[in-house]
Image: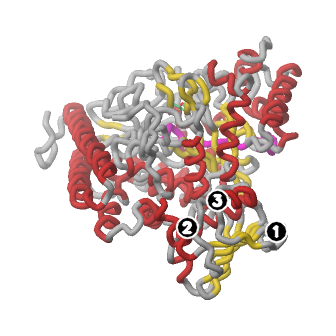
Amino acid sequence: MTTTLHATDVHPAWLPDAAFEPVARRGAVLVVPDGAARAGVDTDEVLDALGAEIDALGPYDGEPALLLELSGGGPVEGEESFRLRRERGRLTVTAGSSRGLLHGFFHVVRLGDAAFTGPDADESHAPAAALRMLDHWDNVDVHPVMGQVERGYAGGSIFYADGRVREDLSRVRAYARLLAAVGIDRVAINNVNVHAREARLLTDDLGEVARIAAAFRPYGVRVHLSVSFAAPMTVGGLETSDPLDEDVRAWWRAAADRVWEAIPDFGGFVVKADSEGQPGPFAYGRDHADGANMLAEAVAPHGGLVHWRAFVYDHTQDWRDRSTDRARAAYDHFAPLDGRFAAEVVLQVKHGPLDFQVREPVSPVLAAMPATRLALELQVTQEYTGQQKHAVYLGTAWSEVLRWRPWGDAGASVADVVAGAGGFAAVSNVGDDRFWTGHPLAQANLYAYGRLAWDPALDPVDILDEWIDLTFPGAPDALRAGLHLILDDSWRTYELYTAPLGVGFMVRPGHHYGPDVDGYEYTPWGTYHFADRDGVGVDRTRATGTGYTGQYPEPWRDVYESLETCPDELLLFFHHVPYTHVLHSGTTVIQHVYDSRFEGVERVERMVRTWESVADLVPVDVAVRVRERLAEQLRSATEWRDQVSTYFLRKSGIPDEHGRTIY
Ligand code: GCW
């Protein structure tokens, strides 16, 4: 279904020409620091003045409605902030930097006509968090098992082809523009699993990386590289990678000096260490603060960052050993290190304790490290949520994570925890597919990620409205309603037909698409459901289980510990219960398994019907691609329903009250 050819005719996503029309029609003027206005904003002039490319904004007829004002210092602080004033339908965007001005400009584009028609106003805007990054798990070469983009479902890499950085980076520029329009400010351009070829990006290929950085630069997006902890040995020829070894430290310092010499605004390094076979400090008896701080020392003189991932666990676990709990791992490894990380280190923490499952509790690490700079890691690429064959809008799921309050209602939210100097990182869902994301509706996830990283308080359904307005300018009400019907609750729909009640996985090993209830049950990966003839679920209580509930502060450590208070949707994540256990919803676990699988498929059938009723309101290529994907979603959801239901009928011997489940 996806093509490995570089798409030449690329879909404009949320920046079609028509999205600029409300601004272009009224005209815009750029005001540069010396006060001289530049009329009729012309692409080249804006490039010169802002270091940024903005589409030509239409003829200047002397009465522009938008003034873009670059002020030296100006009324608002912060490199990315901007001020927006509206006086009698005339807008002034003021910022102290070209990045701030770009954010302000795209803010106006997003609002469209409404930007000009509202009452007089004077507002200041700034991102909630400094770091709003996308990670690409792209390989330079095509990996024999993982392909070119690990967990990529939208074709090949936009950065690399034929074993090298692409000659033509126009696609990267277009991507940078899309990212700027939603406020993304950093991109890591290679896989966190760093293979031999990719390790050379840090050395021989620096000139090529500099070309990629140049494509992003006009849009205020900085480039980062994933590096291997073993690089001093594999590319440096040293005999050790011990973080406390002086030669190793000197090697990293020299490596960093070279990178920043080639790319003065380089962002920093991303590191996956001691995780799923990647090298790390444990081999030398050192801990992750030792490892991260060594890199911090190398990047510090350049103002760089080290994104160090907390995704550390034992992937060679014995399934017979029920006391080892993968969910505990990140906290056990990292919480004791709070306060020891250097200021340049950003600890990048997956939103849940396992691995981007459709439903997980929020990682307790986020509440355990007040003295550490934290970034929340999300997965825009739909590894476990339908691989961009299923329409699953993740804005709703992320918003739940961001609004969750680890210390109870009166305490801070996850969004508060990562605000300020910390921030967000997410695995991109983009490839060289003509629609960028395989499934055209998966563009909404990339859009929503950027918007939530800028402002975590946004309502995810409102974000969909913005995305619809921009992507389908002038969308008739029927199309808007149809897209909402399909997407608003699609995350919960996916949850309904896949693994039940937070138990997770049940996917086919390796590629992770489609059901295989016992696929991971007897493997070393630590992702079990423990279904037997009497019950299912993982006992993670302090009383009788792995003790994981104890990693949460009050009140959640007790809420999750108790069967009475544990939320239904996470029941099997925290407890092993009999099939006859009655949920808060009033139904038994086994009947819930049946009912929700059937409801999930019915909802997908409705999605298909809804699409058919609106498909002729969108361009035919979009209509066809979405139709094709929805057909596969329905096939796959049915397979999930039948395998999961029959599996539990056979295990439990308890029939479906409605007689739908086949033995
Ligand atoms: O979920 C797992 C994925 C791996 C990925 C890993 C990680 C890049 O299956 O493909 O490796 O997470 O986050 O490092």
Q: Secondary structure at mark 3?
A: helix
- 301 left or right, relative to 29: right
Q: CA distance from mark 2 to mark 3?
A: 16 Å
Q: Earlier in the sequence, mark 1 or mark 3?
A: 1
The kind of residue tagged 1 is Pro
Measuring from the top left, give residue 529's x and y in whole percent.
38, 34
* Residue 554 tag number: none
Task: Say whether residue 353 is magenta.
Answer: yes
Disc 2 crowd rating (10 Å Cα; few below 14, some 14-19, many 20+) is many
Marks 1 and 3: CB-CB under 8 Å? no
Task: Please give the range of residues in magenta.
Answer: 339-356
Q: Residue at x 63, y 72 (%)?
A: 28
Q: Earlier in the sequence, mark 2 or mark 1?
A: 1
Disc 3 crowd rating (10 Å Cα; few below 14, some 14-19, many 20+) is some
Q: Earlier in the sequence, mark 2 or mark 3?
A: 3
**Quarter of the picture holding the N terminus:** top left
Examine the rendering and report whether any part of residue 517 can be seen. Answer: yes
Q: Secondary structure at mark 1?
A: loop
* Residue 109 tag number: 2
Nearer the observer: mark 2 or 1; the answer is 1
Task: Say whether residue 72 is magenta.
Answer: no
Q: Residue at x 50, y 38 (%)?
A: 355
Q: Which residue is mark 3?
A: 43
The kind of residue tagged 3 is Thr
Q: CA distance from mark 1 to mark 3?
A: 18 Å
* Residue 33 tag number: 1
- 294 left or right, relative to 517: right
Task: Tell me the chief SS of the magenta region.
Answer: loop
Q: How many marks?
A: 3
Q: Secondary structure at mark 2?
A: helix
Q: CA distance from mark 2 to mark 1?
A: 23 Å
The kind of residue tagged 2 is Val
